[in-house]
Image: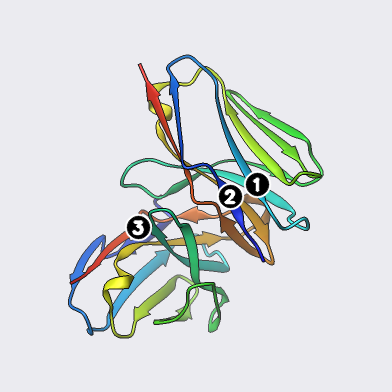
Amino acid sequence: DAGITQSPRHKVTETGTPVTLRCHQTENHRYMYWYRQDPGHGLRLIHYSYGVKDTDKGEVSDGYSVSRSKTEDFLLTLESATSSQTSVYFCAISGDRMYGYTFGSGTRLTVV
Amino acid sequence: GEDVEQSLFLSVREGDSSVINCTYTDSSSTYLYWYKQEPGAGLQLLTYIFSNMDMKQDQRLTVLLNKKDKHLSLRIADTQTGDSAIYFCAERTGGKLIFGQGTELSVKP
């Protein structure tokens, strides 16, 4: 979707290194979310934000931190990457709670 | 706690109807959604239903909601090979979307 972009699209990193994934939106939406997708688990919420500098934890937040210093950017940081964090990460945005979320194209992260 | 369950696989013949089922646990959910994910792509919103509705129809898609049993279904009429994808149901609860595991729909010609 043109209104939301994730970078990088693919990344391979080594165990123990920090990694930052970026989500950028041009829709001026208030709510932003980070999910991870793993086979058999669907999408699980990592962290979300309901405004600049306002963030909260989701169901699988251990080992992850987020920051939102501007409306348009929501960063997800893996403080010290582990192999269990190998996954596909999706960012989503929402401006109106009725209409659900708009998803980015995802970042495939491999931790070796 | 919150939980959304779906069967993992469904296989149909082209031209048949597909029915994908979902159960959820939060009776206070206000909206329920169906998303479609094609290979290598993000999730695309297909349709949604408000919790005070029993049914919603949108072209080939019909959503049925049984609030008593907390059961949601998505029917795709005249299923085409282009409908092959993973379908996720989701409930809105506490301001967040909780997703099921996804149902992989395979359409055979």
Which residue is tagged 2?
Answer: B5
Q: Nearer the viewer, residue B30 or A43?
A: A43
**Hey, which quadrant is residue B57 in on the image?**
top right
Q: Residue at x 47, y 14 (%)?
A: B15
**Hey, which quadrant is residue B71 in on the image?**
top right
**Hey, which quadrant is residue A38 in on the image?**
bottom left
Which residue is tagged 3?
Answer: A106
Amino acid tagged 2 = Glu
Which residue is tagged 1?
Answer: B23
Amino acid tagged 1 = Thr
Residue depth check, mark 1 versus mark 3: number of the one nearer the observer: 1
Q: Of label 1 and label 2, which has the lower sequence position?
A: 2
State the SS at label 2: strand
**Dots 1 and 2: beta carbons under 8 Å?**
yes
Across and down, in percent, residue A2 comes to: 39, 51
Across and down, in percent, residue B101 comes to: 49, 51
Q: Is residue A112 above or below residue B27?
A: below
Distance from Cα at disc 1 to Cα at disc 3:
26 Å
Q: Residue at x 60, y 37 (%)?
A: B21
Residue depth check, mark 2 versus mark 3: number of the one nearer the observer: 2
